[in-house]
Amino acid sequence: IGTGVSILRVDGPRQHERISGSTIGGGTYWGLCRLLTNSESFEDVIDLAEKGDPSKVDMMVGDIYGKGSDALEKLGLSANLVASSFGKLVAKQNPAEGLEQEDLARALLLMITNNIGQVAYLNAQLHKTKRIYFVGNFLRHNVISQQRLAFAIDFWSGGKNEALFLEHEGYFGALGAFLLSQGIPHPTARKDRTRRSVHSHHSRSKTQIGSSNIFAGADNNDADSPPIGKMRARSYSR
């Protein structure tokens, strides 16, 4: 997740394919925040968003059905779920009245994050994988989006999928480009070549390929913290 969003399916070492993407990403957020706030950097606007109240901007499910309505139980929805991002401003004569810049920054961040999460989840469903890893500079210094992605993936999947986040998430594109430019083979690939050479007398060889993973980023059942090279994945408790 950088300026835009790329969705990649990863089946194993050097086995990956870009399957989707979105033009709505970190660049969208920062560009709009430059119009809506006085923040001078991405880090500043994330700090600003942490102080905001999105319920002043977003129309919530409870605003439509009422917070104590029996309809919420029948629909299986919580009153504090977003029904329409920025929807509360439609009915206000002066949409800016009572709003602070931090409220706009927070609501916009959640809107874009929800969109990224849904695109990633739908691709995971399409490609039948449960593991969804999120990487990219958009997530650095951005706990709000990480927690929202974790909640969204858990909510949409009914607890069957989990959002995972990698340490040093902003450097994976650069590291991948460097390794490919140097022609450095993956250690697993070297082992596979050796194994095939040793067992070349067999009429058939067996190759094991792990289950697919979906990566949402710029351009094993042990999902709590599986090793990815020398990096480790983390998840947020539900």
Image (cartoon, rainbow, N blue to C red):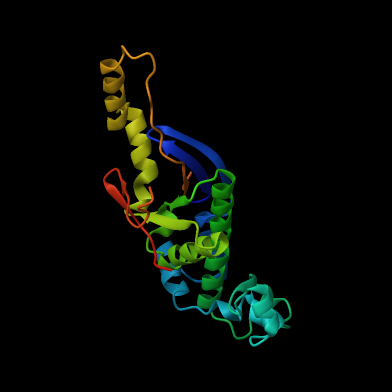
Task: Tell me the quarter of the picture where residue 164 sits.
Answer: bottom left
Task: Give the residue displayed 28% in from the left and 25% down from the top.
Answer: 190
Residue furthest front in the image: 203
Residue furthest top in the image: 201
- Residue 22 visible in the shown view: no
Q: Report x, y in % for residue 93.
A: 73, 83
Task: Give the residue displayed 30% in from the left and 52% down from the top.
Answer: 232
Q: Report x, y in % for residue 101.
A: 53, 76
| Residue 115 higher or lower than 54, as above or below | above
Q: Report x, y in % for residue 88.
A: 67, 78
| Residue 21 higher or lower than 48, as above or below | above
Task: Give the residue displayed 37% in from the left and 54% down from the top.
Answer: 223
Task: Give the residue displayed 40% in from the left and 66% down from the top.
Answer: 143
Task: Say how many tags the image has.
Answer: 0
Of residues 236 and 143, the one nearer the viewer is 236
Quarter the C terminus occupies: bottom left
| Residue 160 higher or lower than 63, as above or below | above
In the image, taking residue 189 as reference, residue 94 lies left or right, namely: right
